[in-house]
């Protein structure tokens, strides 16, 4: 089953890949290695995982404005996510996605916590849509 839901487009373009969901905010400055695309923040739920080529879904970013340039460096090094989905975009992540040409949306109609990691997803930042190929996780408390 393919589910298409609306979101607010932040950075134009289309990106597709396997969904990687973070239950915690991400700091790109000192939290992600720009050479490898690996999450290096100690204790982060995605520590040791690569974000390269994934559709990266997380609530929002955290940390320094230099994080925008880390997203740009990830793209230059071929280690950026294929696309980003945020619950609410903050300026650091939005600017990084825009300068790095990484498609990005926020405010999705379906909560990030209902998206099943590993599912194939296509994000269209120009149209503000997410195509999700699979079943949703149950709502918390259901």
Image (cartoon, helix red, strand yellow):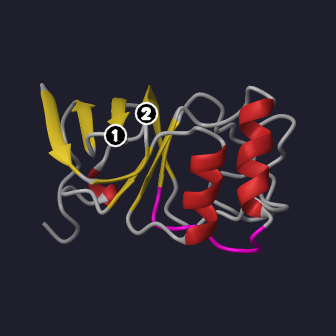
* 62 in magenta: yes
**Segment colored magenta:** 58-65
Q: Quadrant of residue 132?
A: top left
Give x and y (percent) for residue 57.
46, 51
Q: Secondary structure at mark 1?
A: loop
> Which of the labelled discs sits on residue 13, or is there none?
2
Marks 1/2: CA distance? 6 Å
User: On the rendered structure, is 12 left or right of 78?
Assistant: left
User: On the rendered structure, is 39 left or right of 110?
Assistant: right
Q: Quadrant of residue 121?
A: top left
Q: Secondary structure at mark 2?
A: loop
Residue drawn at 78 percent across, 32 percent down: 76
Q: Is residue 126 above or below residue 112?
A: above
Mark yes or no: residue 38 visible: no
* 126 in magenta: no
**Of helix, strand and loop, which mostly describes the magenta segment?**
loop
Residue drawn at 78 percent across, 54 percent down: 69
> Which of the labelled discs sits on residue 126, or is there none?
1
């Amino acid at each position: 089953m393919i589910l298409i839901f609306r979101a607010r487009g932040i950075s134009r373009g289309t990106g597709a890949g396997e969904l990687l969901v973070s239950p915690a905010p991400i700091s790109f400055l000192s939290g992600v290695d720009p050479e490898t695309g690996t999450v290096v923040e100690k204790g982060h739920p995605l520590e040791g995982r690569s974000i390269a080529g994934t559709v990266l879904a997380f609530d929002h970013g955290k940390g320094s404005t230099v994080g925008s340039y880390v997203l740009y460096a990830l793209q230059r090094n071929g280690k950026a996510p294929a696309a980003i989905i945020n619950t609410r975009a903050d300026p650091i992540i939005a600017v990084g996605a825009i300068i790095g040409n990484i498609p990005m949306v926020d405010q999705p109609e379906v909560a990030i916590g209902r998206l099943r990691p590993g599912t194939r997803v296509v994000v269209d930042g120009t149209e503000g849509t997410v195509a999700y190929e699979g079943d949703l996780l149950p709502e918390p408390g259901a």
